Image (cartoon, grey):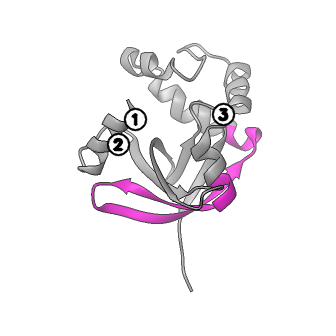
Amino acid sequence: MNPLIKGILRLGIPMGPATLLTGQGRKSGKLRTTPVALMKMDDRSFLLGTFGDVNWVKNLRSAGTAKVGKGSHRYAVTAKQLSPEQALPIFKSVLGHYLQSRMMRSALSMGYQLGPNSTDEDFMREALRHPAFEIFPATFG
């Protein structure tokens, strides 16, 4: 599905929280683009590693910078990986909201073992399994 989603996002067509992340490969140095979910909470932005410690997570962790956006609207960001304890309230707020929708719950079930009645312990288990990054607009100068 990634190539299809990537193509749709490159055209600038909205797909919920999906956006493109473009960052430097940690081994090759080449730019790599992948669709990710950009989550918002209280004017803050987060990327959650839905499928665990995958390549985009490792690349972002290594580089600390990337570009996010869709269509021609992309912007540079810096990223800070959160500890599971720091990520817990984000998981509870953002994912908890989506878990109220049957359709979104179904989509989230591909990566998370959560439901509408998940406990704090359930969310912490997921925060331990899924890297989370807070992203900030990059500043230069």
Depth-wise, is mark 2 or mark 3 nearer the camera? 2
Q: Which quarter shows the N terminus?
A: top left
In the image, which residues are magenta?
A: 60-87
Query: Which residue is rendered at x = 64% and y = 43% of the image?
Result: 132
Depth check, front residue: 63 or 128? 63
- Residue topped by disc 3: 130
Does residue 86 belong to the magenta stretch? yes
Kind of element beneath mark 2: helix
Q: Is residue 52 left or right of residue 3?
A: right
Which label was assigned to residue 2? Answer: 1
Mark 1, Cα crowd under 10 Å, few <14 / some 14-19 / many 20+, is few
Nearer to us in this view, 35 or 130: 35
Mark number, residue 6? 2
In three-dimensional space, the C-alpha distance between marks 1 and 2, rounded to whole angstroms, equals 6 Å
Residue 18, which numbered label? none
- Pointers 1 and 2 in contact (C-beta within 8 Å): yes
